[in-house]
Image: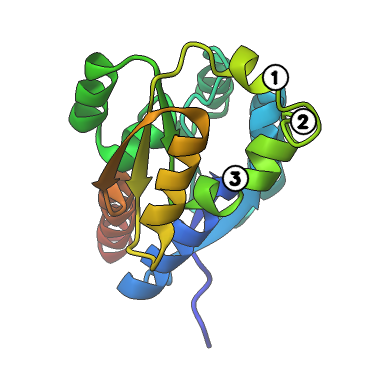
C-alpha cells in the first residue's frame, strides 16, 4: 500500500512545474501539491482568502501544511492569515526573490530598481499573462504607460530550455530594456522543500 503524503504544499500555480520537477527528482513521496491559479496575482487581495480556504479544507488530512507563496502583493494579509492558521510559508516577498535567493535578488534590485523579471513560467505564458492581460495586443500605446519606470529585464531561468534565452532577449528588445540572463535553478525553493521533507521524516522516526 502506498503511504499517504504527510505534507500538503499549497502553492502558486506559477510554481507548479518547478515543484513537480523537484518532487520527481528527489522522490519526495511525503509531499502532495495543490496549486491555486497563477492568475490570482492579478487580484492579490484574493490570495489570502483562497489560501485560508485550502488550509481549512485540508487541515485534518495532513500532518503538516506549508504554503509556497511570497507575500505576492497582499500587503501582509497573507502573513496575517497564516499566523491565525498556524501555517508557515516560504520566506520572501515574491517568487523572484526565493528563486534567485535573497542575497542575489537584493543585489539585482539595488543595481537597477526599475527591473522587470521573467521566470520560466512567465516566459512561457508571457503573451497571455502580460500582453493580453494588459491589453497590449489591442492597445500597444499602453506599453509606455505601464512600463515607463522600467529600464531592464532580467530572466531568472530555472531550467536550460533551448531557445528560451533568445525569446527573453526579444521581449527585452521589444520594450527597449537592457537584458540580463541569470540561471538560478530552484534557488531557496528546493532547499526549503528538502528541509520540510527531512524534518517530517525525522519526526516520523521518533514517533
**In x, y percent, where is residue 55?**
63, 40
Assess disc 2: are there few (<14), some (14-19) or many (≥20) residues with their C-alpha within 10 Å of its C-alpha: some
Local secondary structure at mark 2: loop
Assess disc 1: are there few (<14), some (14-19) or many (≥20) residues with their C-alpha within 10 Å of its C-alpha: some
Return the mark for residue 135: 2
Quadrant of the snapshot with the C terminus: bottom left
* Residue closest to the eye, 177 or 54: 177
Q: Nearer the viewer, mark 1 or mark 3?
A: 1
Instruction: Looking at the image, tell me whether mark 2 or mark 3 is earlier in sequence order.
Output: 3
Marks 1/2: CA distance? 8 Å
Q: Tell me if residue 86 comes above or below residue 194 in the rendering.
A: above
Q: Colour scheme used in the picture?
A: rainbow
Instruction: Looking at the image, tell me whether mark 1 or mark 3 is earlier in sequence order.
Output: 3
* Residue closest to the eye, 95 or 113: 113
Q: Which residue: 19% across, 23% down?
A: 107
- Do the residues under discs 1 and 2 have CB atoms within 8 angstroms? yes
Return the mark for residue 142: 1
Left or right? Give the position of 193 relative to 14.
Answer: left
Q: Identify the residue under disc 3.
A: 126
Amino acid at each position: 500500500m502506498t503511504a499517504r503524503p504527510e505534507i500538503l504544499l499549497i502553492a502558486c500555480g506559477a510554481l507548479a512545474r518547478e515543484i513537480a520537477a523537484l518532487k520527481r527528482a528527489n522522490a519526495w513521496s511525503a509531499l502532495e501539491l495543490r496549486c491555486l491559479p497563477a492568475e490570482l496575482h492579478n487580484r492579490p487581495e484574493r490570495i489570502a482568502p483562497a489560501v485560508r480556504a485550502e488550509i481549512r479544507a485540508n487541515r485534518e488530512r495532513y500532518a503538516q501544511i506549508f504554503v509556497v507563496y511570497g507575500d505576492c502583493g497582499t500587503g501582509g494579509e497573507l502573513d496575517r492569515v497564516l499566523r491565525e492558521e498556524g501555517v508557515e510559508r516560504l520566506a520572501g516577498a515574491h517568487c523572484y526573490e526565493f528563486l534567485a535567493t535573497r542575497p542575489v535578488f537584493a543585489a539585482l534590485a539595488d543595481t537597477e530598481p526599475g527591473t522587470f523579471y521573467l521566470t520560466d513560467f512567465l516566459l512561457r505564458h508571457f503573451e497571455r499573462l502580460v500582453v493580453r492581460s494588459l491589453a497590449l495586443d489591442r492597445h500597444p500605446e499602453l506599453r509606455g504607460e505601464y512600463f515607463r519606470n522600467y529600464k531592464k529585464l532580467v530572466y531568472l531561468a530555472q531550467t536550460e530550455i533551448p531557445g528560451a534565452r533568445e525569446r527573453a532577449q526579444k521581449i527585452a528588445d521589444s520594450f527597449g530594456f537592457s537584458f540580463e540572463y541569470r540561471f538560478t535553478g530552484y534557488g531557496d525553493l528546493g532547499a526549503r522543500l528538502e528541509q520540510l521533507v527531512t524534518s517530517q521524516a525525522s519526526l516520523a522516526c521518533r514517533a
